[in-house]
Amino acid sequence: MEILAVRDLTFTYPQCSSPAVKNVSFELQRGELAVLCGATGSGKSTLLRLLKRELAPLGDKQGSVLFNGKELSELDSITSASAVGFVMQRTEQQIVTDKVWHELAFGLENLGTPPHEISRRIAEMASYFGIGSWYDRDVSELSGGQKQLLNLASVLVMQPEILILDEPTAQLDPIAAADFIATLKRLCCDFSITIIIAEHRLEDVVPICDKLLVMENGSLIAADEPRSVISELNSRPDILCGMPAASRLHAKLSGSGSCPLTVREGRSFIESSYRNTTRGLPQAARCSSDAAAMEFSSIYFRYSRDSKDILDGLSIKIYEREIFCILGGNGSGKTTALSVGAGLLKPYSGSIRVFGKKLKDYKNRSLYRECLAMLPQDVQTVFLRNTVREELDECGAVLSELPFDLSPLLDKHPYDLSGGQQQLTALAKVLAAKPKLLLLDEPTKGLDAAAKQGIISVIRSLKERGVTVAIVTHDVEFAAVCADRCAMFFGGRIVSDGVPNEFFSRNSFYTTAVSRMTRGHFDNAVTLSDAAELCRINGRKELPCS
Amino acid sequence: MKSFAEYNPIVITVWFFSVTGVAMFCNYPLLMLMSLCGAVIFFLMRNGLSHGREHLFFFILFLILALANPLVSHNGKTVLFVMNHNPVTLEAALYGVNSAAMIIGVLYWLRSFTQIMTSEKLLYITGALSPKLSLVLSMALRFVPLFSRQSAKINNAQIAMGLYKDDNIIDDIKGRSRVFSILITWALENGIITADSMEARGFGACRRTQLRRFRFSVRDTAFLILTLLLLAVTAAAAGTKSLSFVFYPSITAENPDLLGIAGLITYGLLIFLPVIIETEVSLRWKYLRSEI
C-alpha cells in the first residue's frame, strides 16, 4: 500500500482569488525518492507544507492527504510530529538550541522520550552521520553543510517514515549539496525511508530519483519516472533549463532513444551518435583593455595574530571591462579576498590598487562613491526598509536606468521576495552608487535556473555599460557561461587562471558537466551551446544497416 | 577518575555556594584570610601564572576597598592620626582590610566559578529547576551571538555599498538606528522559521523530558555529603558565639572554643577539597601511567 496519497488537493490562501495548489493528486510508495520541481512561485512549498500537519498554512483546503491510509488530521500529535519529518531551506534558522547534542535531543525531548532512550538514539544517529567529532560543539561554529546535516539528523532521530525536504541544498555550496543528496540516497536505500524533496538544482538529484513531479502554476503537470517526464516535456525550455546537462543536450539535439541523465550516459550518447571530425570551435580572441581595474599584489591576511594566513601572497589582476570569476572550494578564502578588496578588512602586508590608485589613498569612504561596490553573499543584509520602493528611493536609484524591471515588486517587503528577486533588488541598490567596479559574492546562491539566466544577462549588460565585474562563486556552470576570465582559488592564492574554454578543459574534476561529457571526443567544449554546435557541425553517425 | 571541574555541576555549585556563603555572612578575620588565600591558590592552580591583568585589577581594588573604610568611618578608640579634622582609627583600618579580604576573596571564587560553569553546565542546573527555563536559556544563548553577527554583517554590507554618506557622527547614528530597526524585522522573520521548526518536531505535543549529560556518580555523592558536613560544622561555629570578633569600639577577640576550632579546621578542609582532589587524581594518574 502507498505510504502517502494525495487526492485532488486544492488549496487557496485567504484573500487570494486563485488557488496556490490546484487539483493535485499523486502517490508515494514506501522507500521511493520523489523530486518535486518547478519555477519559483509554482506552489512547491505550499504543497509540501500541506503534507505536514504542524506546518500546514491557514486557508481553504479541499481534497485529502492520506498517510498510511489515514487522513493527516486524524493522526495523534506524537505520530504526526515524529512520523513525518520536515527539513526546510534556511539552514541557520531551523536550529533551535545552541549545542549540537542538544539540537539532536530536542525533538525526542518534545515527545517525552525517557532520557536513557534519547542518549541511545542520538549516539546511534551521531555515529551514522559521523557527527561524533563535532557533537560537543556550538552550532555557530559549524559550516553550512554541517548545519544542514545536523538539521537532517535531528529530524531523523525521531525515526520518521517519510521525509519532506523543501529546497534543502539551496544555501549550500555544490560539494556540500552533492554530499547531502548522496546522504539522502543512502537513507532511501538503507532504511527505505520515503523521501520527497523540492529542488531546483536538479543535476545531482534527478538521476537518483524514482519519481519526478513537475509543478506549474499550482498544478502538477507531470508525475512519472524521470526519463519519461523529460522526454514528455521536451518542448518546454523553461522547465528543461534546470534539468541535468546530459538530458538538456539530448533535448536540444532532439535525440532519439531513452534520455540520458548522468554524465556517463550523456557521454555514451554523444560518442555513439556523433562523429568528431571537427574537434573544436574557433575561439574568439579576447578583447579587453590592458588597464587593471583592481590589482592585488602579494596580499597577506589573517584574522587574528595567532591564526594562520587566510590570504597567502595573493596576486590578481582584474582588467577593466571584464567579467572575472574566482572559483574555489569552501573555506579557501575567496570571500575574504573580496572583503579585503572592498576595503572591509585590512591585509597586514601587500598592496591593493583600484583603478591605479592605492586603496588607502581613497579617503573618507570615497572609494564607495562611483568607484567600487560590493554585494555580500547574504543579500538580505542589504535591505533596511519596509518596501522595495523605499529601498530604491533611499539610495536614489532610478528605475528606468536599470537593465532589468523591478516595477511589479515596488510595494513588497524585500524579505518577502524570492531569492532571484532579492538579488536583483540588491543589485539595483548597489548600482545606484554608479560603481565602475562591482564585486559580487555568490550571486547565484539559492537561485533557480531561470533566475540564474536573468542574473547572467544582467551582468552581461552591465559589462556593455563599461562596468568591471568580479565574481566569487562556487557555481562552475554559471562561471563557464558568464565569465571572460576564470581563476581557481586555493590555499589563499590563485593557482591558475584563463579564459573559460581553456580553463575548464584543462581542469578535469573542477569543471562543467558538458566538459566532462565531451572530454576526448571534442576539444574545448565547455558549455551546452558549444557542445550542441559541435554536434551539429559534425553530424550524426550513420547507423549500421540492420 | 575525574578532576574537580568534571564533577556533577550541582555538586560544584553547592560547594561554591558553601565556600562563598561562609565568607560572605561572617567576618571572622581568620576565616577571611583562609577564604582569600584559598581563592587565590585555587585560581592559580587552574590558570597558572596567566591572567596578570586580572590579578593587578583585584590587587588595586583590594587597596581601594581597604583604604576607603578608615577614610569614611571614624568609629574606634585608637586614633592613628587626624586628617581634615577627622580622626583615622586603627579599628576602622583593620575593619577595612578585613572586608576587602572578604570581597576580593569572593570575587576570586566567582571568577573561578564562571570558568568552571560552562553554559552547558548552567543549562543542566536550570534544567533541574525547570526544563522550560532551560530551553529558553539555550535559545537565548544561541540567539544573542547570532543577532550581533548579523548586525556586523549588515553594517559591512551597507559600508561596501557606499550607503553611509560621510564620516560624521549624526549620519553614523542614523545609519545604525536603521540597521537596528531592520534587525528587529530580521529577528521576527527568523523567529517564525524557528517556531515552525520547533513545531514540526513536536514542541508542545506532550510533556517534555530532558536529556541529562551529567550523571551522579558515587564520587559526586561522596563529595556532596562531605561538603554539606563540613559546611554544617563551619556554619555552627560561625553562627554561634564560638567564633566572635568585635572591631568597634576596640578590637576584642576571645579565644575560640572547641567548636570554633573545629569550625576553622572544617572550613580549611572545605576550601582545600578541590586541591586535595586534584592532587589525588594527578598522583593516581602518575601511578597508573607507570604501569602502562
Image (cartoon, rainbow, N blue to C red):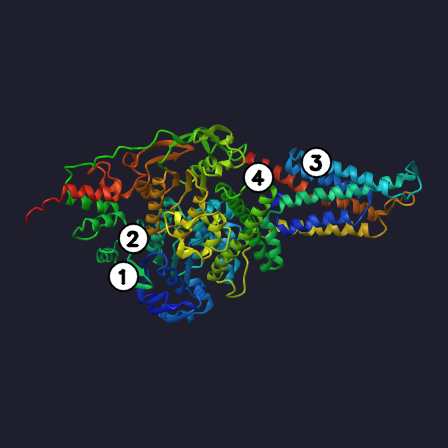
Q: Nearer the viewer, mark 1 or mark 4?
A: 4
Question: Is residue A79 toward the left or the right of residue B41 in the image?
Answer: left
- Amino acid type at circle 3 is His
Across and down, in percent, residue B106 comes to 73, 44
* Mark 2 → mark 4, Cα distance in angstroms: 52 Å
* Mark 3 → mark 1, Cα distance in angstroms: 72 Å
Q: Which mark is residue B247?
A: none
Question: Is residue A519 toward the left or the right of residue A351 in the image?
Answer: left
Find out whether the residues at labels 2 and 4 contact each other: C-beta distance under 8 Å: no
Chain designation of label 4: B
Sort mark 3 into few (<14), some (14-19) or many (20+) by Cα contacts within 10 Å.
some
Closer to the camera, A339 or A126? A339
Can residue A64 be spotted in the picture? yes
* Mark 3 → mark 2, Cα distance in angstroms: 63 Å
Q: Which mark is residue B167?
A: 4
- Amino acid type at circle 4 is Asp
Q: Which mark is residue A206?
A: 2
* Mark 2 → mark 1, Cα distance in angstroms: 14 Å
* Mark 3 → mark 4, Cα distance in angstroms: 39 Å
Position of the N terminus of chain A, as image quadrant, is bottom left
Closer to the camera, A54 or A501? A501
- Residue found at the far left of this picture: A545
Q: Nearer the viewer, mark 3 or mark 1?
A: 1
Number of numbered discs visible in the structure rendering: 4
**Which residue, given by chain and number where applicable, does mark 3 sit on?**
B55
Q: Which mark is residue A222?
A: 1
